[in-house]
Amino acid sequence: MRSAEERSIDWVASIPFFLIHAIAVAGLFYFPLSWEAAAIVAGFYVVRMFGVTAGYHRLFGHRSFEVGRGMQLFFAVLAMTSVQKGVLWWASHHRVHHKRSDLEGDIHSAKLDGFWWSHVGWILSKRYERTELDKIKDFASYPELRWLDRHPLVPPVTLAVLTYALGGLDALYWGMGVGTVLVWHGTFTINSFTHLFGRRRYATTDDSRNSLLFALITLGEGWHNNHHHYQRSCPQGFYWWEIDVTYYVLRAMQAVGLVRKIHVVPEHVRAKGRVEAPVAAPTAAEATAAARRSVRAASMATSAE
Ligand SMILES: [Zn+2]
Ligand SMILES: [Zn+2]
């Protein structure tokens, strides 16, 4: 549990965050909603959410698949168009979450510090503004990634300029305004909701959950209990029915040679560490019937003697 001082928000640095929310809401009164607008929002959301989950999370956070250096840069730039800082910043903090998940020292534990802190508070706080390169030495050795980490606004601003040039103010508002707010909160649900709501398959030391709803919202990240059980697996859906769009796209990229190797969960790991099936307490009627049976058995045993 954090002290009030530890939770203090950096209000000045957070102005752009609140401003984009305000623009997204206020703009609804100026920019008419249309099918075209909905398509822009959906397109910007899906492509950039894929960048978040494949790039920030599965590649830089966990090295769950392997790519060449050019594709590595592609995933870094694509992820960063969602305006969630540098890949080294994102992945280094995420690794601390896994190391200490729902224990003292976890950066964003919904269990210890509540829903809002895990959803957004930790991002706006003064405490986690710096990238800790020693926690991500494997990727910090690439100068292009360190450069991007120092200039986190280059990918999103470039995308914004291109969007404005090609689609005008309407496309800029729907794609980079509304679309950015949605992709932010879609991402944040994994740190908040999937540690609070859903089912647990594995007895992990944290409170992580599996949820189809959040797997659909985040293109596969909702199988968060699976993910905490075995982080190295690129597919986070461990069975065919656990929908994981990010994994399907990465498999397609592997088929055409853009992704080299994909790590999956070994069968013995998938089978172990399950939550015991809960034993339901007997109902009153079942308890009475069982008591009657035992009395009858006892009386039969006595009469047989
Ligand atoms: Zn993770
Ligand atoms: Zn987690």
Image (cartoon, grey):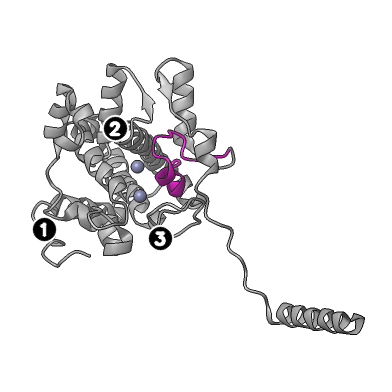
- x%, y% of residue 238? 52, 39
* Mark 3: secondary structure: loop
- Going from N to C along the chain, the mark reached first, 3 or 2, is 2
Task: Looking at the image, tell me whether mark 1 or mark 2 is earlier in sequence order.
Answer: 1
The stretch of residues the image draws in magenta is: 218-239
Which mark is drawn over residue 203? Answer: none
Q: For marks 1 and 2, give the CA distance.
A: 29 Å
Q: Is residue 107 above or below residue 258?
A: below
Which residue bears the numbered disc 1? 11
Q: Is residue 97 above or below residue 238?
A: below
Q: Residues within 10 Å of mark 1 (few under 14, many from 20)?
A: few
Marks 3 and 2 close (CB-CB < 8 Å): no
Asked which quadrant contains residue 162, the reply is top left
Mark pair 3, 2: CA separation: 25 Å
Q: Is mark 2 within 8 Å of ligand 1?
A: no
Say whether residue 148 is magenta.
Answer: no
Mark closer to the chain start, 3 or 1: 1
Depth order, front residue of 19/129:
129
- Mark 1 belongs to which amino acid? Trp
* Foreground pick, 115 / 298: 298
**What kind of secondary structure does the magenta stretch mostly adopt?**
loop
Relative to 149, does residue 258 appear above or below in the rendering?
Answer: above
Label 2: which residue? 60
Determine which residue is flagged by label 3.
Answer: 196
Q: Amino acid at mark 3?
A: Leu
- On the rendered structure, is 175 left or right of 161? right
